[in-house]
Image (spheres, rainbow, N blue to C red):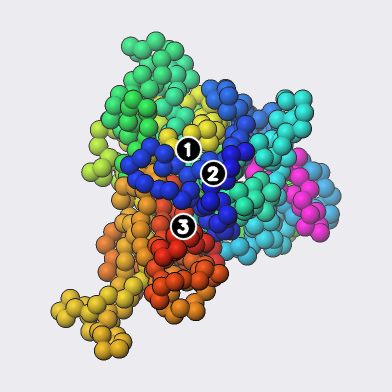
């Protein structure tokens, strides 16, 4: 191990420390990096998850995890479903296919006691005031702590990966030799990113004393890093459905990418859709973000939701709600049956899609309503779903396509808005990645929208693109040199009151001096370019000499220019804490110089007591609101 930088001793739970010497234009302004033998990336997805790894000495050779036992027909199982099962006393039991199969085989009376969770990652995106205590609901309606579930899942992947590495090495592989990377959507806010880091601490992936051992990677950024390395035989060009003309198939798509080329990565996952705009900077091939990440909760689970709404329309919301609680395992079965048919949907399909209804659905419906499922279908006014004599729901292709429409419309709407922006012109390639990118309905919609303005590229192993890119990012995190800030960040300060400029109600008189309160001091504005390693400097003084800890509220806004912390749309989003205890100062007014870094995937802070040049413990916390 390299000797830790002095910043290491700052290891505060809230934030990753920087190395103390940060000069902007120097080449060595990267934070100190954890010394590892191997990089393991975990793609913790809404619907499916997996890991991949590469050894530092063979960075070109990326290994994806061993194939899993148990898979679904028609679904390639390089990744495993993001499903987790806890015993009735809330202990971890199993993850992935194993969890699903075990849960499915439980007796219905027993399965009601067990806690089964799926598609729970979205909770981090949708919870407005996310905290360490946020709850999740299992299929049986019981509450569990989200942090525990995420930590169990990460611990499971840690164990699997270390086991595989040990088997390969023929000796026990130490966790200290691993540099971990966890991927998150780019549109996630800071609390959600910090939540993932907290879960990793709890799972024992890394310790708070060594936060650099874990990197949080942004999903579309990872995809972008992988896509520019693609060789032509590794992808499909939708513009002409063949390998690209004019290049030999072994060339990089990068061979078609020249200095200054701009491209968009559309990462369509289970829960979210993330759009990133990058420009390539040669000769090193570094990347620069041209517009802040955008997107929204428009992943493929939106289609599952539409299917559920369709079932409610046919069988009644009251029945579906009851069925999910009373027969949770059968409900899971029904959704699995739907999943495989969902993958068979295509624009030119003419024959109907059959979905198996579990026997307990048919049976429970008869008990609940006193008439048959067949009767319900006949009497419902949903004419494109019929009952087949083999006990299946028969859907016309139009009915299936209608379930896709709301989600795809959202994605296309977002793309239209993105391409209308002045920053987003001359886009040479559009990379379509993520599991949902396999959908031919989505591919066709994107083609129709672009009308040949950019070449649409889909990598062959589209579901693993993010995983492989995350490994590359872990091997060289400095590859993305310039990012855009997703929000405007700042703090509230007192300024000298200026007549005519400041509103009179903001005036405060202190010792005969007139001050203006609530002034927003901007650290960084939304969509502003920030270079990796670039810092924002501010100096703070304790209000009274005896003060041990300075707590500064950090505010954020979607708006670019903010005057006061009381402006509409400004909210408190975190706290900056400076621990000045134990450092006696020779001067009466102590000055604490604070450096904040916004160019990385997480916001970091460090501070120095100017009089003594001593490091002050600094942290930014976004989770305890």
Q: Is residue 438 left or right of residue 66?
A: left
User: Can you tell which quarter of the image residue 246 is in?
Assistant: top left
Could you tell me which residue is drawn at 55 percent across and 69 percent down? 582
The residue under label 1 is 477
* Rendered location of residue 67, percent (x, y): 69, 28
* Rendered location of residue 119, percent (x, y): 61, 49
In the rendered image, residue 85 lying in the magenta stretch gets the answer: yes
Q: Which residues are magenta?
A: 81-100
Mark 3: few, some, or many residues within 10 Å (few <14, many ≥20)? many
Q: Is residue 42 above or below residue 232?
A: below
* Rendered location of residue 273, percent (x, y): 45, 44
Identify the mark at residue 606; answer none if there is no mark: 3
- Mark 3 and mark 2: Cα distance apart in space: 18 Å
Kind of element beneath mark 3 = strand
Image depth: mark 3 or mark 2 in front: 3
* Rendered location of residue 484, percent (x, y): 35, 47
Residue 345 seen in the current view: no
User: Can you tell which quarter of the image residue 158 is in?
Assistant: top right
Upstream in sequence: badge 1 or badge 3? 1
Residue sitting nearer the eye, 123 or 198 = 198
Quarter of the image containing the N terminus? top right
Could you tell me which residue is drawn at 73 percent across and 40 percent down? 159
The residue under label 2 is 215
Kind of element beneath mark 2 = strand
Kind of element beneath mark 1 = helix
- Mark 1 and mark 3: Cα distance apart in space: 20 Å
Asked if labels 2 and 1 touch by Cβ distance under 8 angstroms, the answer is yes
Residue sitting nearer the eye, 97 or 542 = 542
């Amino acid at each position: 191990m390299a000797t830790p930088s002095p910043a290491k001793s700052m290891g505060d739970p809230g934030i990753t420390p920087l190395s103390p010497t940060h000069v902007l234009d120097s080449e060595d302004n990267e934070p100190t990096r954890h010394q590892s033998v191997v990089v393991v990336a975990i793609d913790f997805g809404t619907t499916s998850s997996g890991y991949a790894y590469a050894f530092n000495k063979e960075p070109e050779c990326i290994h994806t995890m061993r194939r899993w036992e148990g898979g679904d027909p028609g679904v390639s199982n390089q990744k495993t479903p993001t499903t987790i099962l806890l015993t009735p006393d809330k202990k971890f039991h199993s993850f992935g296919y194993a969890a699903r199969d075990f849960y499915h085989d439980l007796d219905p009376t027993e399965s009601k006691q067990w806690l089964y969770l799926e598609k729970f990652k979205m909770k981090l995106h949708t919870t407005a005031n996310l905290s360490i205590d946020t709850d999740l609901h299992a299929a049986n309606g019981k509450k569990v702590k989200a942090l525990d579930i995420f930590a169990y899942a990460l611990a499971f992947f840690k164990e699997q990966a270390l086991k595989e590495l040990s088997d390969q090495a023929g000796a026990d592989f130490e966790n200290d030799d691993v540099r971990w990377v966890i991927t998150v959507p780019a549109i996630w806010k800071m609390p959600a990113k910090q939540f993932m880091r907290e879960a990793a601490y709890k799972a024992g992936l890394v310790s708070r004393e060594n936060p650099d051992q874990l990197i949080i990677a942004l999903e579309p950024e990872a995809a972008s890093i992988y896509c520019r390395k693609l060789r032509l035989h590794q992808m499909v060009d939708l513009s002409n459905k063949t390998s690209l003309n004019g290049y030999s198939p072994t060339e990089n798509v990068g061979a078609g990418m020249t200095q200054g080329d701009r491209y968009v990565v559309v990462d369509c996952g289970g829960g979210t859709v993330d759009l990133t705009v990058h420009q390539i900077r040669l000769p090193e091939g570094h990347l620069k973000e041209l517009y802040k990440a955008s997107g929204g909760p428009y992943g493929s689970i939106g289609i599952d939701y539409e299917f559920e709404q369709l079932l409610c329309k046919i069988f009644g919301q009251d029945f579906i709600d009851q069925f999910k609680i009373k027969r949770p395992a059968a409900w899971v079965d029904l959704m699995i049956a739907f999943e495989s048919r969902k993958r068979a949907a295509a624009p030119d399909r003419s024959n109907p899609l059959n979905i198996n209804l579990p026997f307990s659905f048919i049976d429970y419906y008869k008990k609940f309503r006193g008439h048959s499922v067949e009767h319900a279908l006949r009497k419902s006014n949903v004419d494109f779903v019929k009952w087949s004599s083999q006990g299946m729901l028969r859907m016309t292709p139009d009915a299936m396509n209608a379930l896709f429409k709301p989600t795809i419309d959202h994605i296309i709407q977002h793309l239209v808005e993105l391409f209308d922006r002045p920053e987003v012109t001359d886009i040479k390639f559009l990379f379509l990645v993520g599991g949902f990118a396999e959908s031919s309905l989505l591919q066709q919609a994107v083609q129709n929208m672009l009308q040949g303005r950019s070449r649409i590229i889909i990598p062959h192993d589209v579901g693993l693109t993010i995983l492989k890119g995350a490994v590359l990012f872990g091997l060289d995190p400095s590859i993305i040199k310039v990012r855009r800030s997703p929000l405007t960040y700042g703090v509230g300060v007192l300024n000298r009151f200026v007549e005519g400029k400041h509103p009179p109600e903001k005036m405060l008189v202190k010792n005969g001096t007139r001050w203006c309160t609530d002034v927003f001091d901007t650290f960084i504005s939304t969509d502003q370019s920030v270079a990796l390693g670039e810092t924002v400097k501010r100096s703070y003084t304790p209000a009274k000499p005896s003060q041990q800890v300075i707590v500064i509220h950090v505010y954020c806004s979607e708006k670019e220019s903010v005057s006061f912390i009381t402006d509409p749309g400004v909210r408190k989003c975190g706290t900056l804490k400076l621990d000045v205890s134990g450092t006696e100062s020779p001067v009466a007014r102590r000055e604490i110089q604070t450096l904040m870094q916004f160019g990385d995937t997480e916001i970091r802070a460090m501070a120095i007591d100017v009089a003594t040049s001593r490091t002050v413990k600094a942290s930014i916390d976004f989770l305890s609101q």
